[in-house]
Every structure is written in structure tokens, then in C-alpha cells.
């Protein structure tokens, strides 16, 4: 099983050799992390390096490949495939970065899969990092739902969908982007439109909403959470608004797609105790019309989720279509 300390159940059958390994790579704007596992799924090595995002796609691929080679040497295995969860809009068929934030210089248009294959000499599959997160989380021990919404509450709000056990990308690769669905506020979103879920539920927005309510007190989301736990009414209100908006968004998606479960990850979920009361209240009054209970649950894999999901994309690349 992959990542046994997390209770992952993602069987891998890729090689008859006793010393084969797969690697999952999590590429973000500040850090590149990787997790190397055996074909049985035991974690063999892990590590991270700073992400040279300002130096271009080539430098990012060099850093990722160098990290992987170091882990493979440490574990003394033969690498057979690599999966990547990368920030940005990904062409999951070609592994090319279609669009990315300004943080990533020379990232948009970069053929990441091809470049890593050239450096590592193995098949490489690339997914958006939120998609990879959901693949990893949905495979966690005890989770059997084949239709799942994933939500990442971080600097922004990302989303992903698994339908009938497979990632659902949509015709343009944009399925699941719940963070930019409207109707939750009258505030301007980072994308320039108004009222999106991200205006209330991201870490950035939680800090901004608290600043607005307190005439300019500048705190980050973690500090706002500390204030809420100490009884600060403004901080509690900010998390209540975030929890309610999150629950409404999940309930809307569940109603449209008949989803029984939403898994929520990202840094904001460190304050799950503050989000949960509003989520529960909202689901009591605004549950899916099907009458089937919607479970909105926190992620369990922590910082390994993206890498574990990336390993699953690598596994699927090595298994004939329909066989997994």
C-alpha cells in the first residue's frame, strides 16, 4: 500500500523486479517535494528543495529531476515512472503547463512532462496539484466513494472532481474550479469578478475580512484563527462566513452532480474546528435536495497528499486503460 503511515490503499503493479520505485513530485511556487515508494507502496525516501520559480521552467525541471535522482540513489531502486502535481492549468494529455500565475516565470507553455522524461528516462504524468491532491485523498484508507469533490483552501481556493473513480477534467480542463463560482459575497475576487467563494474562504480572504471588520488590524489567517479560539467575535464571524460559503458551494456541487462527499484540504483546514460549526449549521438548512447526506470532511494526508496523488497518476500511466 502506498504511504502506509497514512493508510493509503493504492495498489501498484508495475514491475516484476524487486527493486522498482515510483515517485510523486509536488511542484509549488516556493518548494518542490517528492516521495519515492516501492511497487508495494512502502515509502522509501522523501525530500524537498527550494523551487527556483523565478528562473524559468528549465530550472524548475532541473531542480525536480535532481531531487528525484537523489532519492532514487538513497533508496537504491530503479525508477519506473514519475507523477507530478504542479501548480497552474495543466494539459493533462501532454503534460504541458497551459497557464500559471506570475510567480512562475516561463512556466506557461512549458512542456513539463517531456522535459522531465528527458531528464529522468521514465514515463511522466502531470496533473494540476489540486487534482493530484484529490486523487491522493480519495484513496485514503476507509474512503470508498467513487464520486468526490475536492476543495483546497490555501492562498486561493482550488477544486477538483472525481466521477466514477476517475478525475473529471471537463472539455477544457477546468472542471471542479469551485473557488471561482459566484454568489457568496459582493466582494471583488482576485480574478477580477465579484462574489466568488474565494472572497470568503481562502486564507488570504480570511485575513482581509478580519482586517475590514477591525478597522485595519493586519493578521494572517492563522493569527485570526488564534483570535477566534480566544473568543474574538470578529474572528469567529470571519470563520463562520467562510464555513457557510464553503458548505453552500459544496452542497450546490453535490446537488448538481449527486456527490456524497467533499474533501477539504489546504492550510485553512488547520482551523477546521472553527469552520465545522458553520458547515454543520448550513448543511442542516441547505442540504442537497436528493435527501442523501453530504459529508464535508477534512483532508487526512497533510503535505503528502499531492505527491501521493501524483504517484497514482504515474501508476495509471503504466496500467492499460480500464485495467485499474
Image: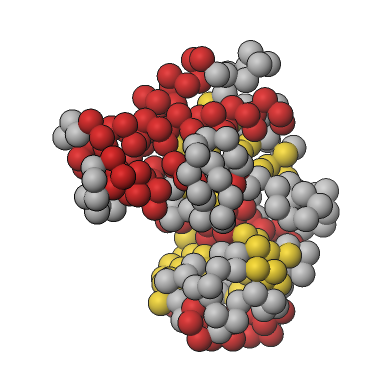
**Is residue 255 shown left or right of residue 61?**
right
User: Based on the displayed image, in which of its 4 quarters is residue 151 positioned?
Assistant: top right
Q: Position of residue 43 (x, y in %)?
A: 47, 60
Q: What residue sits 24% from the left and 50% below the top?
A: 216
Q: What residue sits 35% from the left and 49% below the top?
A: 208
Q: In this rendering, is residue 29 above or below 139?
A: below
- Foreground: 48 or 71? 48
**Is residue 94 shown left or right of residue 83?**
right
Residue 2 appears in the figure: no
Q: Position of residue 288 (x, y in %)?
A: 62, 20
Q: In this rendering, is residue 253 above or below 205?
A: above
- Foreground: 290 or 142? 290
For the image, the number of numbered tags is 0
- Foreground: 135 or 57? 57
Q: Position of residue 212 (x, y in %)?
A: 31, 45
Q: In this rendering, is residue 288 above or below 184?
A: above
Q: Position of residue 173 (x, y in %)?
A: 74, 55
Residue 95 appears in the figure: yes
User: Based on the displayed image, in which of its 4 quarters is residue 183 positioned?
Assistant: top right
Amino acid at each position: 500500500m502506498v504511504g502506509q503511515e497514512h493508510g493509503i490503499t493504492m495498489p501498484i503493479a508495475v514491475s516484476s523486479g524487486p527493486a522498482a520505485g515510483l515517485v510523486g513530485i509536488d511542484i509549488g511556487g516556493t518548494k518542490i517535494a517528492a516521495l519515492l515508494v516501492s511497487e508495494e507502496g512502502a515509502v522509501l525516501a522523501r525530500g524537498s528543495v527550494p523551487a527556483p520559480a523565478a528562473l524559468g521552467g528549465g530550472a524548475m525541471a532541473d531542480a525536480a529531476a535532481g531531487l528525484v535522482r537523489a532519492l532514487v540513489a538513497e533508496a537504491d531502486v530503479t525508477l519506473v515512472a514519475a507523477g507530478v502535481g504542479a501548480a497552474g492549468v495543466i494539459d493533462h494529455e501532454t503534460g504541458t503547463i497551459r497557464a500559471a500565475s506570475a510567480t512562475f516565470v516561463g512556466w506557461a507553455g512549458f512542456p513539463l512532462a517531456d522535459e522531465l522524461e528527458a531528464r529522468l528516462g521514465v514515463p511522466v504524468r502531470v496533473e494540476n496539484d489540486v487534482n493530484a491532491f484529490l486523487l491522493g485523498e480519495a484513496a485514503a484508507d476507509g474512503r470508498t466513494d467513487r464520486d468526490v469533490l475536492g476543495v483546497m483552501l490555501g492562498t486561493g481556493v482550488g477544486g477538483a472532481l472525481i466521477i466514477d473513480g476517475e478525475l473529471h477534467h471537463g472539455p477544457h480542463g477546468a472542471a471542479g474550479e469551485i473557488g471561482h463560482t459566484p454568489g457568496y459575497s459582493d466582494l471583488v475576487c482576485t480574478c477580477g469578478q465579484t462574489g466568488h467563494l474565494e472572497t470568503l474562504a481562502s486564507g488570504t480572504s480570511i485575513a482581509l475580512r478580519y482586517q475590514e471588520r477591525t478597522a485595519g488590524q493586519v493578521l494572517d489567517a492563522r493569527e485570526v484563527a488564534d483570535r477566534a479560539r480566544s473568543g474574538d467575535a470578529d474572528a469567529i464571524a470571519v470563520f463562520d462566513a467562510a464555513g457557510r460559503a464553503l458548505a453552500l458551494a459544496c452542497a450546490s456541487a453535490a446537488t448538481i452532480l449527486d456527490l456524497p462527499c467533499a474533501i477539504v484540504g489546504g492550510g485553512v483546514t488547520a482551523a477546521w474546528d472553527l469552520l465545522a460549526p458553520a458547515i454543520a449549521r448550513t448543511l442542516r438548512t441547505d442540504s442537497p435536495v436528493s435527501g442523501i447526506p453530504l459529508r464535508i470532511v477534512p483532508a487526512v494526508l497533510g503535505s503528502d497528499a499531492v505527491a501521493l496523488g501524483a504517484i497514482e497518476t504515474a501508476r495509471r500511466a503504466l496500467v492499460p486503460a480500464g485495467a485499474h
